[in-house]
Image: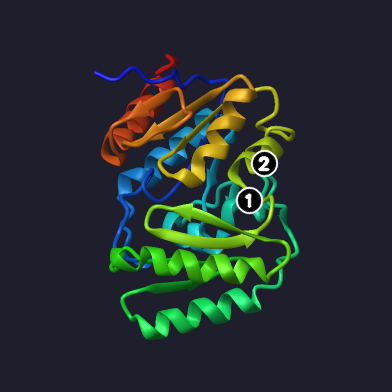
Amino acid sequence: MQTLPPLTPRTALFLDFDGTLVDIAPRPDEIIVRPHVIATLQVLHDQLEGALAIISGRELHGIDSFLSPLVLPAAGEHGAQLRQADGTVTAIVPPDLFIVSRAASRLAVMHPTLLLETKAGAVALHYRQAPELQALCLETLTEAVSRSPGTELLRGKQVFEVKAMGVNKGRAIAAFMTRQPFAGRIPMFVGDDLTDEDGFAAAQQLGGHGLKVGDGPTQARSRCASPTALRAWLEQSAAALMQGAPA
């Protein structure tokens, strides 16, 4: 039995999406959100008085499409887009990604097993179906970033992403924690990927908890075996909070 940090009425809960709430799929648009996940999130949102946010590399509209009818506070594109609890949305001015987009597009045309994902302020190149192309993807995007001021390369699970420099999930969590209903609570961030490490660090530096889903080195101080195990724990936690007991 794994010992997970307690989820209490004073928790501010921040959840990654892919690989955490849902299992990773071959393509980003092929993930499946189980109906009970949405029901559990609704209960947690209510029991935590709104202090629940999704922190994802996806765009906000993509998060919403999978979690409909819920519209939760959220950070999209690793924090480039922020939607507060009152519905206010802010977004950074995206960097010039022309050189990066052109290089990634050419590579995707040459290698159809690669998947190019163009976002409002980022470009992601997925090589899940072509792991042998990892080095080529890295070389191509690294060179493009060197010619694109204000950008940086982010490594994820079988994906390389180019985004605005300095944008990360840790800063997104810190921003949420300055505003209601998150302010004054104990943050807990749950994620599974290298892209989540800044979030773990931020939550722990603010006196809260980082919870890593799955294997691999991490600075998170707690770990959960899999998305399936995490979903079960969230469901149990929601039930416990409804009964007035921390999970």
Question: Residue at (57%, 77%) from the top-left corner?
Answer: 101
Question: Residue at (37%, 63%) from the top-left corner?
Answer: 134
Q: Position of residue 43 (x, y in %)?
A: 44, 35
**Which quarter of the rendering shows the N terminus?**
top left
Name the side, left or right, on which 205 lies relative to 224. right
Q: Amino acid at mark 2?
A: Arg
First in residue order: circle 1 vs circle 2: 1
Q: Amino acid at mark 1?
A: Gly
Number of on-image labels = 2
Question: Residue at (49%, 51%) from the top-left corner?
Answer: 70
Q: Nearer the viewer, residue 229 or 245?
A: 229
Please name the residue that numbered disc 2 is placed on.
171
Q: In the figure, residue 115 lies in which quadrant?
A: bottom left
Residue 187's label in the rendered image is none
Look at the numbered disc 1 and give the secondary structure of its residue: helix
Q: Position of residue 71 (x, y in %)?
A: 55, 52
Q: What is the image's colouring?
A: rainbow
Q: Nearer the viewer, residue 124 or 150?
A: 150
Q: Nearer the viewer, residue 34 or 203?
A: 203
Label 1 with label 2: CB-CB less than 8 Å: yes
Q: Nearer the viewer, residue 236 or 139?
A: 139
Q: Position of residue 69 (x, y in %)?
A: 47, 55
**Which quarter of the rendering shows the C terminus?**
top left
Please name the residue that numbered disc 1 is placed on.
79
Instruction: Indicate whether 49 appears above or below 65.
Output: above
Q: In the figure, residue 231 lies in which quadrant?
A: top left
Q: Position of residue 103 (x, y in %)?
A: 53, 79
Question: Residue at (34%, 66%) from the top-left corner?
Answer: 27
Which residue appears farthest toward the top when viewing the image? 245
